[in-house]
Amino acid sequence: MAAKHNAGGTLRDIEVGNEPPLVGGGRKRAPDRREVSLRWLSGTTLTGLTSTLLMGAALFAALDGRELLATPAEVATSEELGTFGGQDLAEKGARVVKARAIRPVPSDRRRMSVSTVTRVGDSEVIRTKPFEQVKIALAASHQTDRSYPPFNPLNIYSDGSEPEAAEEGDPQSVIYGANVETEVSVRVADFDFESDITAGAPMLNDEEAESIVRANAAILTDGSIQVASLHYIDPLRFGIDDPGLATGLGLAAPARIIPQNMSVASRQAEGEDDVPIFEEDLVEFNATEEIASVLESTGYGLSASMAEAIETLLKTKTLKPGYAIRLGLQETPKGNEIVRASVYSGSTHQLTIALNDRRQYVPAPEPVDPGIMSERDSGNEAPVIVNRELPTAYNAIYQAVLSYDLPEKMAAQIVRLVAADVDFQAPIKPSDRLELFFSLPEEGDAQHEEQELLFVEASFGGTTHTYYRFRASDGTVDYFNPEGRSARQFLLRKPVPNGRFRSPFGMRRHPILGYSRMHWGVDWAAPRGTPIIASGDGVIEKAGWTNGYGKQTLIKHANGYETSYNHQSAFAKGIKPGARVRQGQVIGYVGSTGLSTGPHLHYEVHVNGTRVDPMRVRLPNSNVLEGEDLVAFERERERINALLGKDATVVAQADG
């Protein structure tokens, strides 16, 4: 198709597809293809520069500021290579498999709901009660505005030191071995077929009973119950992987009952699991110690080479108190092996070193999962300040307990428990601690608002003693160590709590007679009139004058033991032959009667009529649980240990 026009407006022939170019912009001729557009060139250049900058910024952000995409892979070799060099360091990523803590890390305060069983009449009531576990650092700066009684040794032994006798009708709770959501009352009685079966109840013959059992066979197999009338017995249902069990029970052939739409896989034998097991442990530094010796003491594999790697990167061989090393462990046939170590100063991460697949130690970022450190940091324990004058043991116990809003009676009970092992007038050490477990008052329960102290663990001077509260079958409530021995001493070695030790047992030159002769006791000096307390429970055998001894009191105790108190100025009220006294009771007052040079108490201990050294004689325990009481105590002890995450073996060793 073609059109025609001319300059005068007439049409002329134009070939379609071969039209002349359009000319604009003041041009008088067509553009040359070899010409370069300045606007196009500048636009293209700016677009390229902008794209380059944007891509560079994105790449920089993706690398998190690192200038190199990768660095050489090793910082230190393992025990096989045994070298460290000035090599570049590589980064090891986080582990995919989540580790589990090898031991629980204590927290400062933890509340829990525990099922307890209480004997009420002829029934046992099981219900949930609130309890609390508290761990106290005695050297921390505890503040309290509550007052407490000043130190008086007489009050420690004479105020409630004897076992408590449960009052009639006073319910005593023990820890129940299972969780109960609501209150349950249980009464156990013998079933009487004559009186417990109501008159007119339908009776079944043997055929009817067997028919009912067979009809309900499917539900009767639940649990570890053996029912003789079932057609088949699945051994795996009872946790026994023995196909011959069915034939052993007299069945024609072994059989398995498999529900519909269920796949059954054979049990995997122990040791067939190839999935690596990762654990964690935490090593805390309480004093300035060498890294190598501390890691070596853990007994884990590769501890020496890991210690060398830490020392190289930290440029120190020791760590100060407050530091901790978080160990990542992998289970191997030879035991746990250290594959990662993270060093913390308090809660601040300092360094992490990990073992890669080539058995090389490389630096790694802090583990993403806080793991064992989260439990450590959640403790919120009061900071221990050692650059100050630490309080005495007596003041530290009261201040700490009262600062936790616990009753004063609980502090007094703790003081009585540890009295035989702690010098209350000496300052404590920074490592001294208390751990308590006690019941909490329930809302709206005014009758049982007192808090029962069930567990005490006291650490003083590096020695730990553990006590459990237990009610014996005779109704008495006392505290016992893990072996079932009473916390109360059979005899006190110091009947004058405020006295000063002056003269030991043995040969000496008599201060009045002027020649050497045997001194059959020990002397405790104190001002005239200072109270003297009974060393143990017993019966007054004599209270009167004896030549040389002056005013003397003899107390007969159990198992052939007898104590003698001499040179007294006066006897306490009610002290006469035949009177019963308890440990800590005031029986007389210090004096200088008889052959004496000054006010003091001459104290003797006789065993089966033989005088022995009161400070060295091996004394029996006040009360040792036996028989059914011991079995019940061990059951209660294990339940408390399980609640507190205690290892029974470790507790026993610490108390020993």
Image (spheres, helix red, strand yellow):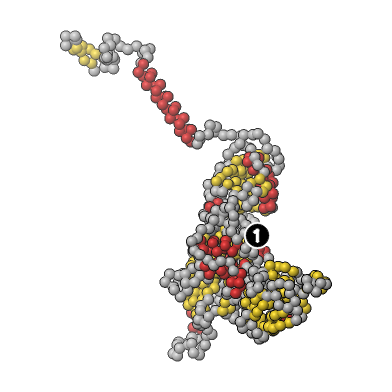
For the residue pair 379 and 645, the one nearer the viewer reads as 379
The picture quadrant where one finds residue 22 is top left
Residue bearing the label numbered 1: 461
Q: Residue at x 49, y 68 (%)?
A: 440
Eyeballing the image, is 61 above or below 345?
above
Pinpoint residue 612: horizontal percent, then vertical percent. 76, 74
Classed neighbour count for the residue bearing mark 1: other residues with Cα under 10 Å, few (<14), some (14–19), many (≥20):
few
Q: Residue at x 65, y 85 (%)?
A: 576
- Quarter of the image with the N terminus is top left
Kindly give the residue lying farthest to the right in the view shown: 515
For the residue pair 362 and 321, the one nearer the viewer reads as 321
Pinpoint residue 486: horizontal percent, then vertical percent. 64, 73
Give the residue type at disc 1: Gly
The picture quadrant where one finds residue 422 is bottom right
For the residue pair 403 and 212, the one nearer the viewer reads as 403
Task: Tell me if 38 is positioned left or right of 208 in this view.
Answer: left
Q: Is residue 130 visible?
A: yes
Eyeballing the image, is 472 above or below 26?
below
Eyeballing the image, is 540 above or below 634?
below
Circle count:
1
Q: Is residue 228 visible?
A: no
For the residue pair 302 and 628, the one nearer the viewer reads as 628
Pinpoint residue 303: horizontal percent, then vertical percent. 67, 48
- Quarter of the image with the C terminus is bottom right
Task: Tell me if 598 is positioned left or right of 646 in this view.
Answer: right
* Mark 1 secondary-structure assignment: loop
Pinpoint residue 297: horizontal percent, then vertical percent. 69, 52
Q: Residue at x 64, y 82 (%)?
A: 575
Q: Residue at x 51, y 63 (%)?
A: 402
